[in-house]
Image (cartoon, rainbow, N blue to C red):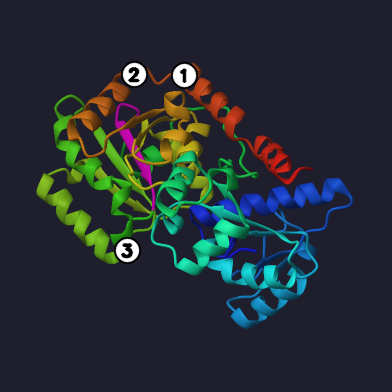
């Protein structure tokens, strides 16, 4: 069961979408396991991820979703919920079907914050947790006193439809679109830009641009992702105050095809976030061979394999962030260096590896 996987884009939606694909694969190949994925807010699924016969979307029909979830859950051996907000449905199913195994995905901030007592009691007594990172697992143990034996880390994977680029040349059409040349030192971030997403660290990146201009006069920072009108105005004022307007572009939301090109365009992918449960965007960047800089206070360190796949810095320390960014910009952007990053990322975070991990957790 999920809240949504296909209606909107975002980290949790992508994780649930990838898990749908994986469970669909497992059910297809097993010949004996059956699968039904119920989604509260989706209307339909993409056929490339899951067979239509194995998916039912309720388009925000809460009553219909609840009734059918309980109906199917009373006959099911394993119930997987994609969000803590679906625990109430899982609880009703468990009361009816005492032998059902309840598995909950734990992503990040949705389980870091205060959890109602009834949910904690249910989780502690009857729920197995698949956590996207050790960081989230440690918070569940330390803050909510959930037994570590009930939590297994299941790192996220790249999208199963992803095809790794074989060449790493900067796309000419994007260079022309943004009036750039191969001589530009290009920083890239990809995230939602809103009041609630400021902990992604894009303010820290903007604030260091003036200090980097002296060493990298052709530096340019591309900020990709939907920006709320209020946040866009705030950032434009910051950019004007810092006198860096020629060096920054608020790109906005882009297509999946263009997003891949932006990863290829950049010299350094930078998102010094402080509250990532895992950080799918970091492995997406690494899969394109990007040099990656993240924060070091959250699950993004695991996405970067604790330094093997990129660099994690203390985002609250401007000096550290500036120094690491400068070091990365000075490094050679060669085909071989990008290929090495890409190969390591694909080895650790491919959909095939994810499916192997899920099969092991399910005991199949």
Residue underneath mark 3: 228
Residue 158, picture quadrant: top right
Q: Contact, CB < 8 Å: mark 3 with mark 2?
A: no
Q: What element carries label 3?
A: loop
Instruction: Kindly report the distance in space between the C-alpha atoms of the residues bearing marks 1 and 2.
Output: 10 Å
Mark earlier in primary sequence (1, 2): 2
- When the figure is inspected, residue 29 is found, relative to residue 42, above or below; the finding is above
Q: In this view, does 348 lie above or below 35?
A: above
Mark 1 touches mark 2? (CB < 8 Å): yes
- Horizontal arrangement in the rendering, residue 47 relative to residue 2 (left or right): right
User: Which image quadrant: the N terminus?
Assistant: bottom right
Dividing the image into 4 quarters, which one contains the C terminus? top right
Q: Which residue is pictured at 48% across the width and 55% down the height? A: 10
Residue 4 location, x and y as percent?
Answer: 57, 64
Q: Tell which circle, 3 or 2, labels the residue nearer the N-terminal end.
A: 3
Q: What stretch is highlighted in magenta?
A: 181-191
Q: Where does label 1 land, which residue?
A: 337
* Residue sitting nearer the eye, 79 or 246: 79
Residue 270, position as x, y percentages in the image: 34, 37
- Disc 3 and disc 2: Cα gap in Å? 35 Å
Q: Which of 157 and 187 is in front in this view?
A: 157
Q: Is residue 187 part of the magenta span, yes or no?
A: yes
The residue indicated by pointer 2 is: 331
Label 1 vs 3, first from the N-terminus: 3
Residue 343 seen anywhere in this rendered image of the structure: yes
Contact check, label 1 and label 3, Cβ < 8 Å: no
Decide: few, some or many residues near mark 2? Use Cα within 10 Å; few <14, some 14-19, many ≥20.
Answer: few
Residue 207, x across and y down, in percent: 18, 41
Q: Is residue 218 visible?
A: no
């Amino acid at each position: 069961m999920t809240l949504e996987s296909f209606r909107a884009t975002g980290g949790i939606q992508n994780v649930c979408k990838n898990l749908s694909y994986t469970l669909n694969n497992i059910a297809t190949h097993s010949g004996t396991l059956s699968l039904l994925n119920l989604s509260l807010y989706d209307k339909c699924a993409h056929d490339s991820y899951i067979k239509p016969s194995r998916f039912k979307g309720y388009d925000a029909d809460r009553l219909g979703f609840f009734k059918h979830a309980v109906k199917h859950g009373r006959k099911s051996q394993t119930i997987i919920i994609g969000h803590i907000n679906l625990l109430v449905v899982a609880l009703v199913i468990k009361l009816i079907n005492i032998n059902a195994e309840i598995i909950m995905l734990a992503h990040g901030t949705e389980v870091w914050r205060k959890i109602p007592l009834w949910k904690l009691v249910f989780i502690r007594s009857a729920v197995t947790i698949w956590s996207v990172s050790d960081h989230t697992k440690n918070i569940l143990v330390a803050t909510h006193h959930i037994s570590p034996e009930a939590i297994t880390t299941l790192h996220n994977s790249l999208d199963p439809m992803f095809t790794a680029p074989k060449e790493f040349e900067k796309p000419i059409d994007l260079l022309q679109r943004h009036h750039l040349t191969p001589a530009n030192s290009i920083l890239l971030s990809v995230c939602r830009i809103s009041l609630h997403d400021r902990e992604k660290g894009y303010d820290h990146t903007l604030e260091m641009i003036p200090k980097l201009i002296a060493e990298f006069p052709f530096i340019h920072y591309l900020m990709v992702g939907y920006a709320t009108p209020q946040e866009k105005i705030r950032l434009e004022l910051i950019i004007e105050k810092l006198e860096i307007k020629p060096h920054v572009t608020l790109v906005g939301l882009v297509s999946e095809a263009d997003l891949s090109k932006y990863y290829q365009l950049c010299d350094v992918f930078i998102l010094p976030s402080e509250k990532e449960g895992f950080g799918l965007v970091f492995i997406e960047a690494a899969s394109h061979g990007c040099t990656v800089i993240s924060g070091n206070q959250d699950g993004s360190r695991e996405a970067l394999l604790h330094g093997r796949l990129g660099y994690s810095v203390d985002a609250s320390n401007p000096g550290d962030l500036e120094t690491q960014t400068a070091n990365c910009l000075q490094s050679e952007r060669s085909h071989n260096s990008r290929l090495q990053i890409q190969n390591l990322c694909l080895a650790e975070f491919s959909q095939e590896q994810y499916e192997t991990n899920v099969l092991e957790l399910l005991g199949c």
